[in-house]
Amino acid sequence: MKEENVTGLFCLNDDRLGFNQQFKGQESTGLYAVNADGTKLSVLQQLVALEGETVVNAPPKQFAVIDDLPDDPNHLLVAVYRGRSGLADLFRVNVYTEKLTKVMNNPGKVRQWLTDRAGVVRLGISYDETEEAREVIYRRDEKSKWVTIMTVPADGEEWEPLGFDGDNRTLYVRANAGRSTSAIYTYDPEQLKITGTVFAHDTYDAGGIIYNRHLKKVI
């Protein structure tokens, strides 16, 4: 693997590393796993080769990593795309064998996903490119039905879910909530209401937010 640059490196478990490789400086990347001693290389997602805008070598399946599943060191949770639709179903991919196991079908037009602290998919943002509003859907646990908890119009209003708190119920969200600037709040998806303000500033938007599930905090 000497032709392309490694652009990202991360730990999968105590023995195995994951890394991305980029094709000729373009946005296209592949995803690989290898033991820390350099053995047992696995191609989780083949690199997409491009010549200009022409796809020379396209993998049979393309996906995005949703959760590294720290309680399941042998798998990653990934969204596997259906062609070029932008829609995806959720799978676990084995970081040793490359095997994909379906977790759930897309319940509609979900294009963004959020998991809780246990790696369970609990929230999605559903929209179509032609629609003027986005729906935030939520479920109490993996056996519950999806319900719409927020409709966000495309008129400048903001409501962005960031992550679950340690109780696996409280959400951190970024919203303007009647303000002229965006702030960070806690939100109860069962009662459908903001329960507290984490950070707000009258002049500046809260931006560049990093939610770290392992550190259990918003930065």
Image: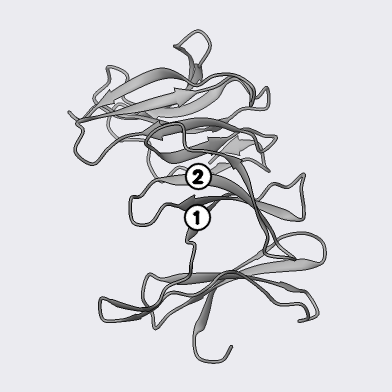
Instruction: Tell me the number on the disc at residue 31.
Output: none
- Relative placement, left or right, of 98 versus 138 is right
Q: Which residue is mark 1?
A: 64
Report x, y in % for residue 3.
Answer: 50, 91
Look at label 1 and name its amino acid.
Answer: Ala
- Residue shown at the point (51%, 71%) measured from the top left: 30
Image vertical order of residue 95 relative to residue 204, above or below: below
Give the farthest residue toward the bottom: 2
Snapshot quadrant of residue 44: bottom right
Q: Quadrant location of residue 180?
A: top left
| Type of the residue with mark 2 | Asp
* Left or right placement of residue 3 versus residue 183 in this view: right
How packed is label 1: few (under 14 Cα within 10 Å), some, or many (20 or more)?
some
Give the residue displayed 72% in from the left and 60% down from the top: 12
Q: Residue 114 at x, y = what percent?
A: 52, 36
Position of 95 with respect to 6 (left or right) is right
Determine the secondary structure under disc 1: strand
Location of residue 52 in the rendering, given as x and y in whole percent from the top left corner: 26, 81
Q: Secondary structure at mark 2?
A: strand
The answer to whether any part of residue 142 appears in the image is: yes
Mark 1 touches mark 2? (CB < 8 Å): no
Compared to 182, does 104 lie above or below? Answer: below
Q: Quadrant of the N terminus?
A: bottom right
The crowding category of the residue bearing disc 2, from other C-alpha atoms within 10 Å (few below 14, some 14 to 19, many at least 20), is some
* CA gap, disc 1 and disc 2: 11 Å
165 is higher (above) or lower (below) than 59: above
In the picture of the structure, the residue carrying the numbered disc 2 is 89
Q: Position of residue 170 (x, y in %)?
A: 58, 20
Q: Earlier in the sequence, mark 1 or mark 2?
A: 1
- Decide which of 130, 69 is in the foreground and name it: 130
Which residue lies at the image location 71% right of the left edge and 77% below the top edge?
41
Question: Quick check: can you spot residue 198?
Answer: no
